[in-house]
Amino acid sequence: MTTLVLLPGLAADETMWRSQVAALARWRPIVTDVHVRNASIPGMAAALLAEHPGDLLLVGASMGGMVAMEAARQAPERIAGLALLGTNAHAETPVMRRLREEAIVMFEQGRVAEVIEPNVELAFHPDQAGNPALVAAYLEFVVRAGAAQLIRQNRAVISRPDARVHLPGLKCPLLVMCGDSDRLAPPEKSKEIAALVPHAQLVMVPQCGHMLTMEKPEIVNAALAAWLERLA
């Protein structure tokens, strides 16, 4: 039996997948929380593989995509399909490392809201950043994650492996999706992933930022459902 697993991004939880869980109910998706319980991207991937035996369909967003790529490196024979949404295959850059380390210092000081609230403009397309309900849902799950998770998961992202090394050998079907206005994982990163895997399908979501599962759920759901249908 093949299990469909949805992997949240940094500090996120099942809230960001709420629309997809409903739309993809036929495939009985499971939202994992391995990112909450493990301190590194390889550790998260290993826990995912250990907790869900058999073949896997992995749909990972942002940091969840990094975990999904690492799971495909660790156990390529078990991955029946990979969907990567708004993610980055590169290792951390010095500039981003510095920014994350500065944020970690602020998290350690208890200044979570001070870091997270301005992040709304980076996480969402301007059209969606003005949606109070959408922004409130985002801020709620990030703040709920708390400083300790934000610190641990940012450190995991800082030390993540460079997935570009193994992606060219990926054999399973690959769907790559990205918001066309994503400022946290720009479209160039998704285009690079698709270019590394000749059989990849690339979908750009219009007028959309980084939180594409929440910003444009209808488009994301339709693309995922069509991809899953083809795999079936």
Image (cartoon, rainbow, N blue to C red):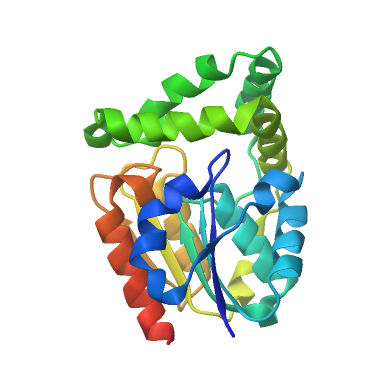
Identify whether 178 is placed above or below 69.
above
Identify whether 94 is placed above or below 220.
above
Q: Residue at x 62, y 63 (%)?
A: 69
**Numbered marks: total:** 0
Q: Residue at x 30, y 45 (%)?
A: 215
Whether residue 129 is visible: no
Residue 51 drawn at (x, y percent): 72, 66
Q: Where, quadrant-wise, is the C terminus in this rendering?
A: bottom left
The residue lying toward the viewer, choosing from 88 and 20, is: 20
Quarter where residue 170 is shown: bottom right
Q: Is residue 199 left or right of residue 10?
A: left
Quarter where residue 32 is shown: bottom right
Identify whether 100 is placed above or below 8.
above
Residue 211 drawn at (x, y percent): 39, 44
Whether residue 5 is visible: yes
Quarter where residue 1 is shown: bottom right
Residue 44 drawn at (x, y percent): 72, 54
The residue lying toward the viewer, choosing from 209 and 139, is: 139
